[in-house]
Amino acid sequence: MKKFEEKTLAEEKVFTGRVISLYHQKVELPNGNTSTREIVKHPGAVAVIPITNEGKIVFVEQYRKALERSLLEIPAGKLEKGEEPLVTAKRELEEETGYEAANWEHIQSFYTSPGFADEYIHIYVAKGLKKLENSAALDEDEFVEMFELTLDECLEELKKGSIHDAKTCFAVQYLQLLQKN
Amino acid sequence: MKKFEEKTLAEEKVFTGRVISLYHQKVELPNGNTSTREIVKHPGAVAVIPITNEGKIVFVEQYRKALERSLLEIPAGKLEKGEEPLVTAKRELEEETGYEAANWEHIQSFYTSPGFADEYIHIYVAKGLKKLENSAALDEDEFVEMFELTLDECLEELKKGSIHDAKTCFAVQYLQLLQKN
């Protein structure tokens, strides 16, 4: 789908970081005028909706420096270069929660902020959870605490604002739909 | 919620753009070690789930330079400085679809990419839609086409990948939940 395509007239790489890089572009609009675009490139990510045998979702609380607060989120992580998303998903679930899952289903992938970033996140549902005796360690700059919540508890945390990011709001809706079927 | 707080030891503003700005931080982790964080600041946004009297959602197709493709999205737009989100929502609905709505409900707000950005988006449901005879014009660098889809058509476009961003996937699940109640 290329409707209303904008042609790149010039591009400058403004920043290269550990996680993201930033580009500034001059573009030609569909009507021939020019404008500028600011574009963040991101390696892509996965997120997992881990559902316990009791129908609870497993969350991790972590500090988000961009927001200067912590959030309750579903387990997630960035793709390593060339890595299959499902491999990332299994690793992140283990590292962040100590669980492995017998059943994996890819339910959706989406762009998180298409207005300025190419971040693309693959969402999996993981069931048949089992605690590992010796689970892999977190990244050395990662600190999380795990919580398991029923749907009612999720809706309570949504109201209180502890659950507050797009993928996790999507996960709560997913559980609502699941429990209505 | 400040659990696992990371203290800012140093901060450099790397880029100031029309829409976003980028900061590079050195931080102190909860265990006393240091790391770096790359943070995009964004003015915040609104998105509207416009539901017609026939139960269809109104979408706009637009080109997303960050993805080099167009997407079918719910109408959305950035907050002007100091603007009430509901005011932005009404303006964006009118500009992008030519509709005004009699009934507005705020259903959720969420961060889109808490790992690297502070973008915060307010989601409204708009009902009682009425076509305006003379609707406000789009921004001069904005080109969109409008579509109205039933839930079944939404699910079809999801499968085809035309609907492919977080807020719009959330909107489709919202309609699914609405039609189950």
Image (cartoon, coloured by chain):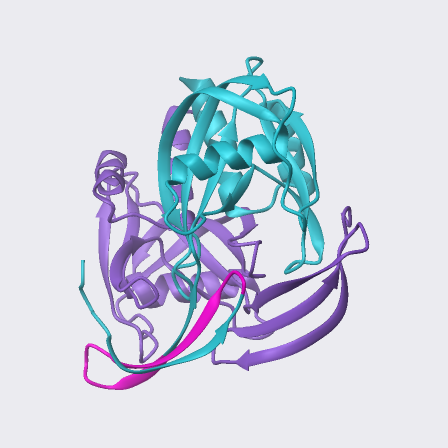
Chain colours: A cyan, B purple
Which sits in the foreground, B115 or B134?
A: B115
Q: Please, is residue A165 above or below residue A24 in the view?
A: above
Q: Nearer the viewer, residue B4 or B64?
A: B4
Give the magenta part as a residue range: A18-36
Residue drawn at x 68%, y 29% as measured from the top left: A147
Q: Residue at x 40, y 35 (%)?
A: A86
Q: Nearer the viewer, residue A47 or A174?
A: A47
Q: Quadrant of residue B100?
A: bottom left
Instruction: Tell me if residue A83 can be seen.
Output: yes
Splitting the image into 4 quarters, where does residue B63 fall?
bottom left
In the image, is residue A24 part of the stretch drawn in magenta? yes
Q: Residue furthest top?
A: A53
Q: In this rendering, would A105 be left or right of B22?
A: left
The picture places residue B74, in percent across and down from the top left corner, at 35, 53
**Vertical comparison of A32 with B81: above or below:** below
In the displayed structure image, the side of residue A82 where residue A33 appears, left or right:
left
Rendered residue at 49%/75% (across/down): A15
Q: Is residue B127 visible to the viewer in this orientation of the structure?
A: no
* Vertical order, A111 against A46 (above or below): below
- Residue placed farthest to the right in the image? B32
Q: Is B25 left or right of A21, judged from the image as shown?
A: right
Front in this rendered view, residue B177 or A126: A126
Q: Position of residue B70 (x, y in %)?
A: 25, 60
Magenta span includes B161 = no
Q: Quadrant of the C terminus of chain B?
A: top left
Please tell me which residue is depicted at 32% across the width and 48% down the height of the picture.
Answer: B164
Count the marks: how many?
0
Residue A96 location (% of width, % of height)? 62, 35
Instruction: Please state the horizontal and vertical placement of residue B73, each as a whole percent of the image.
Output: 32, 54
